[in-house]
Amino acid sequence: MGAAVLGMVTLGAVATGSSPSAGAQLRCNGRVRLCGLSLGEVAFATTHNSMSSPADGFIGPNQGKPMSWQLAHHIRGFQIDAYEGVDRGGRIYTELAGPFGTQATDLPPALVATATRIHESIGAPPAGTPTDVYLCHTFCELGGVKLSVIAAEVRAFLDDHPNDVLVFVVEDYVAPERIRAELAGAGLDRELVAVAPGAELPTLGEMIAARTRLLVSLENGDGGPTMPNAFTALVQETPFTFLTASSLRAASSCDPNRGVAGAPIFQFNHWVTPPTTRRARAVNERALRERVERCTAARGRTPTLVAVDFAERSAVVDVVDRINRASSR
């Protein structure tokens, strides 16, 4: 209980990005000095499998609170997975034969067996049945939420927080055009910032002034400058498969994984698989702070996307705030 309370207090400790009063300086993601920093120079509190929470019926979730709560509590970076699916009487049937195939799942064998059983019992819909884009983790049978629903929540948040910038990294198993269409349905297509390989990233202040406050990148596909492939030239990262808390303390936990050296956005993956609240408590406070320091030294730069499971039971917002205070001096 103590860890949960601490995490919730920490998540409420940073100023909001709401519009400043007349005469006040612009505060980008809560800080005046962040306005002059580029996307790659600012740290974002980030959730891993952001969509996966009990609120949307996920079995074996990665987060304890839904994305609407995360937005309200200063999470500004989101790692989400997109699949095609069909609602078959309250259960979502996952279309696993998407344009990019399916991932090698990190789900426990028991959950894979459960999902497979549900998938087979639901049965494939009739040929030609329209699919929707769902945010799921490998199997929508274990929980899913329509991307259109999340897009509407993001639209409402940006309307209420005109001086905040958000970053999404999408593990995509649908065509980029389908993701773009879902974003356009919520009016988010005009918020997408365009980035070009090798070009300097805009500052937060420039994004806010242009009302392009949303960076969306894809892990598999490539949707052009406003929805680029993450690991071509934009994002570099740490490994993301850690089976024990002790493995996060290893020097190798800071090694380069996907992406290329020099990519401007550094994705810092910090969680233990499979996710449980007990495991999250073990790594989301002191271990998170220590590993950020260790990997900053090893990689020669601070993280951009500090991603955790069960963010509501973590110090991630405080850690990010400390990084940003130091970066903006």
Image: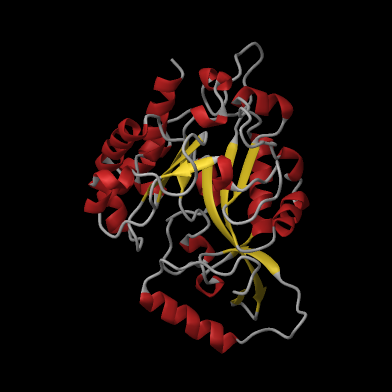
Which residue corresponds to the image point at 59% horizontal and 69% vertical from the top-left?
A: 101
Counting from the top left corner in percent of width and height, residue 266 is at 46, 38
Q: Locate residue 251 relative to residue 22 in the image: left or right.
A: left
Counting from the top left corner in percent of width and height, residue 2 is at 26, 46
Counting from the top left corner in percent of width and height, residue 13 is at 41, 31
**Residue 99 sits above or below residue 29 on the image:** below
Which residue corresponds to the image point at 66% horizontal and 51% vertical from the top-left?
A: 222
Which residue corresponds to the image point at 39% horizontal and 44% vertical from the top-left?
A: 256
Which residue corresponds to the image point at 54% horizontal and 75% vertical from the top-left?
A: 141
Among the 4 quarters of the image, the one containing residue 207:
top right
**Residue 171 sits above or below residue 5 on the image:** below
Q: Could one spot residue 168 in this view of the protein? A: no
Q: Could one spot residue 93 in this view of the protein? A: yes
Counting from the top left corner in percent of width and height, residue 301 is at 40, 29
Task: Judge by depth and name the residue closer to the eye, 160 or 289.
Answer: 289
Among the 4 quarters of the image, the one containing residue 189:
top right
Can you name the residue that lies furthest to the left here? 246
**Residue 70 sits above or below residue 273 on the image:** above
Task: Judge by depth and name the residue closer to the eye, 310 or 303.
Answer: 303
Q: Locate residue 7 relative to residue 181 in the image: left or right.
A: left
Can you name the residue that lies furthest to the top here? 23
Q: Specify how the rendered protein is coloured.
A: secondary structure
Q: Locate residue 73 relative to residue 230 in the image: left or right.
A: left
Task: Judge by depth and name the residue closer to the eye, 187 or 195.
Answer: 195
Q: How many marks?
A: 0
Quarter of the image containing the C terminus? Answer: top left
